Image (tube, rainbow, N blue to C red):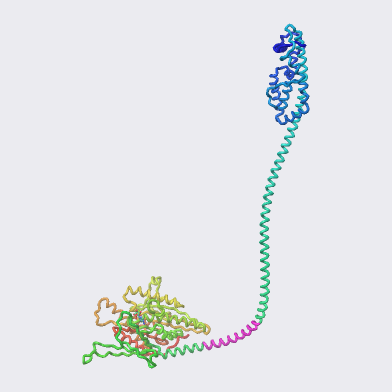
């Protein structure tokens, strides 16, 4: 039995062994030789606490080579199945615990040494149950003990070394496995990454394919609807084709019928052409006949006019106007002609009661009856159309190439302007002779155009006041140019007279004529404000140059139609005192009377076939020279007032007109070339 030793001594002994002061010869290894054994062998002799700490340190040192716990765990488990069962047999409890802690990588808590049955008998001795404690003097015994202990320690050390070797080998193996596993893991990770990338790529492709599938589905839907529409359209077209085929058949049937009809028609056309040619020949013959008839009509018409007289006088009595005193009954009488009341009146009687004259008994003298006879008398109720009807034939003569002159003679207010131009307001019922005559001429010219006649009309309208000529158609632009209007021959050796600085306006329709009359009215109105009642003291001469041509026969005819609204024929009362204003009026009146009497004288000279006709004595007769006498036809309206107060002037007018009416001017000849 080994003597028991106290732990203190054991420690002391250890210390002494380590120190050089221990002189006792011992087989214990010297510090230098111990160092050669390596740190692991040294650790076995350290205190348990210290070893636990180092064990931890060893574990820590192993850690970098086994960074990942799961791998170690796997290794540990593998070892647990293979090597672990051997360990407890060879190693002491402290070493196995430390190694187990390292291998399992578990929390290195306080290492509780596992008591092994084999080691339990040896280890308790030095710690507590040391049987037979040797006395202090028993050094030899103690030495023996120590040697035994040392031997045990060495054995344990060897065991631990072997265990350590095995563990290291296991560790290396585990490390190699870990390295291999790590490499495998990296490979797997790489593969995983590749697989993931492939999966992502696959996802992308899947997405693209899905989109493509959707798109294709959509297109398929569109194509289907298109196909449906096309099918529908095809059906419609087939139907249309059927209808067209039916129509074509119908058209062909009709065409055949039409062709049959055409051949019939062609035969008809041929016969019609023949008939037309025959008719053209007949037409030409008829045209010839018509022309002959037209010329005959003109000749007869002229004869009729001549029979009526180349100078005709119509008397027109205007109605009593509102506000005027009614004339006494029987003041004007219109006796019927020989054919009775249906005969147009040609006679007029005026009853004049002269208060200055008295009978011997002192009773008022009976009224004096003045009878007049004219080519026609128009009582107050006669309308404008009625009047025009009478002169229409005369106007027709102008178209046939005979100069025509129509005058309106009478005192102011007797209805001259009303007769010539018309009443106020533009009422067609009261249209005067000028617009009616032109309308008639335009319409007859239109009719004659079918016989090959072409007519043109040029209008002028002048005013002769105090022996000066003024253009009534002057426009503002023209007025600005100034220049007097003078009557001249159109050219050297020409019979035609023209007024210089006056407008000659071509007219072809009523509207143009109405515009000219309107312009003349405006020009007269302006003059009226400047000089009182000028219009009544001036002659207005509307001239229409008519030119006709029959190109087919080389015929031409031309004549002027003159429509003259003469100045008031009233005379100035010689008993009146003449003031400064009156003198001017006297001069005017003398000029008027002079021109009117010149007109009378010219007519007389023509009637008497005098060698000298005083045309040049007044501007009026000079201007109308070509329309008075010779081949000309003349008509004078004597306009009279129905009022008793105008009886004196009325008688004067009627007397003048009667004189004219007695004139007969030689046979008129048409101006034919
Ligand atoms: P003159 O030109 O002779 O001076 P007007 O033609 O100016 O006379 O006529 C004078 C007035 O008498 C005008 O108001 C006119 O309308 C009217 N008058 C003239 N004749 C007729 C008629 N036949 N019917 C109705 N009114 C007329
Ligand atoms: Mg007048």
Q: Residue 655: image x %, image y %?
A: 32, 88
Residue nearest the viewer, comparing 29 with 424: 29
Identity of the residue furthest to the top in this view: 137
**Between residues 23 and 119, which one lies in front from this camera angle?**
119
Residue 568 showing in the rendered view: no
Q: Hey, which quadrant is residue 403 in on the image?
A: bottom left
x and y percentages locating residue 376 in the rendered image: 38, 88
Q: Nearer the viewer, residue 337 or 21?
A: 21
Residue 586 can be seen, yes or no: yes
Seen at 30% across and 90% down, the residue is 369
Task: Decide whether residue 371 is among the magenta residues.
Answer: no
Position of residue 587 measured from the top left corner of the image (x, y, whole percent): 29, 79
In the rendered view, would you say 412 is above or below 220?
below
Q: Main secondary structure of the magenta part?
A: helix
Range drawn in magenta: 264-290
Q: Residue 13: horizontal and vertical position, in percent?
A: 72, 11
């Amino acid at each position: 039995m080994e003597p028991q030793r106290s732990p203190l001594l054991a420690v002391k002994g250890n210390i002494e062994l380590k120190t050089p002061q221990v002189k006792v010869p011992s087989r214990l290894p010297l510090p230098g030789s111990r160092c050669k054994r390596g740190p692991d062998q040294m650790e076995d002799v350290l205190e348990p606490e210290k070893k636990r700490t180092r064990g931890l340190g060893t574990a820590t040192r192993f850690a970098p080579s086994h960074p990942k716990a799961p791998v170690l765990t796997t290794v540990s488990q593998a070892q647990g199945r293979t090597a672990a069962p051997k360990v407890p047999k060879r190693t002491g409890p402290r070493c196995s615990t430390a190694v187990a802690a390292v291998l399992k990588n578990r929390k290195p808590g306080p290492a509780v040494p596992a008591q092994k049955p084999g080691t339990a008998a040896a280890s308790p001795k030095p710690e507590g149950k040391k049987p037979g404690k040797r006395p202090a003097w028993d050094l030899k015994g103690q030495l023996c003990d120590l040697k035994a202990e040392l031997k045990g320690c060495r054995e344990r050390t060897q065991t631990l070394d072997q265990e350590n070797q095995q563990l290291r080998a296991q560790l290396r193996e585990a490390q190699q496995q870990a390295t291999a596993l790590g490499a495998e893991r990296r490979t797997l990770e790489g593969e995983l990454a590749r697989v993931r990338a492939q999966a992502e790529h696959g996802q992308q492709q899947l997405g693209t394919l899905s989109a493509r599938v959707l798109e294709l589905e959509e297109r398929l839907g569109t194509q289907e609807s298109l196909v449906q529409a096309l099918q529908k359209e095809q059906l419609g077209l087939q139907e249309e084709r059927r209808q067209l085929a039916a129509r074509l058949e119908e058209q062909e049937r009709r065409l055949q019928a039409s062709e049959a009809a055409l051949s019939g028609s062609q035969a008809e056309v041929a016969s019609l052409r023949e008939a037309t040619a025959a008719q053209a020949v007949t037409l030409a013959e008829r045209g010839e006949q018509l022309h002959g008839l037209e010329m005959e009509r003109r000749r007869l018409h002229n004869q009729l006019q001549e029979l009526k007289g180349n100078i005709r006088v119509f008397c027109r009595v205007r109605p009593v106007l509102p506000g005027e005193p009614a004339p006494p009954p029987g003041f004007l009488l219109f006796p019927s002609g020989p054919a009775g009341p249906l005969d147009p009146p040609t006679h007029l009687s005026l009853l004049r009661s002269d208060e200055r004259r008295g009978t011997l008994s002192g009773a008022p003298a009976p009224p004096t009856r003045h009878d007049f006879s004219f080519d026609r008398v128009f009582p107050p109720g006669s309308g404008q159309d009625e009047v025009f009807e009478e002169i229409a034939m005369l106007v027709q003569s102008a178209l046939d190439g005979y100069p025509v002159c129509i005058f309106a003679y009478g005192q102011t207010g007797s209805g001259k302007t009303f007769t010539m131009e018309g009443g106020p307001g533009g009422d067609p019922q009261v249209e005067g002779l000028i617009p009616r005559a032109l309308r008639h001429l335009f319409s007859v010219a239109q009719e004659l155009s079918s016989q090959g006649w072409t007519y043109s009309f040029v209008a002028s309208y002048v005013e002769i006041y105090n022996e000066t000529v003024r253009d009534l158609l002057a426009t503002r632009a023209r007025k600005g140019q100034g220049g007097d209007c003078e009557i001249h021959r159109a050219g050297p050796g020409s019979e035609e007279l023209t007024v210089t600085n006056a407008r000659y306006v071509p007219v072809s329709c009523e509207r143009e004529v109405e515009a000219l009359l309107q312009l003349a009215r405006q020009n007269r109105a302006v003059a009226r404000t400047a000089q009182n009642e000028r219009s009544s003291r001036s002659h207005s001469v509307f001239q229409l140059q008519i030119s006709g041509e029959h190109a087919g026969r080389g015929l031409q005819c031309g004549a002027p139609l003159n429509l003259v609204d003469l100045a008031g024929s009233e005379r100035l009362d010689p008993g009146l005192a003449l003031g400064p204003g009156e003198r001017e009026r006297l001069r005017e009146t003398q000029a008027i009377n002079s021109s009117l009497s010149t007109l009378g004288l010219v007519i007389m000279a023509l009637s008497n076939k005098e060698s000298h006709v005083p045309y040049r004595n007044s501007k009026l007769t000079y201007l109308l020279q070509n329309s008075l006498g010779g081949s000309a036809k003349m008509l004078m309206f004597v306009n009279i007032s129905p009022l008793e107060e105008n009886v004196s002037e009325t008688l004067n007018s009627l007397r003048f007109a009667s004189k004219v009416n007695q004139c007969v001017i030689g046979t008129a000849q048409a101006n034919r070339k």
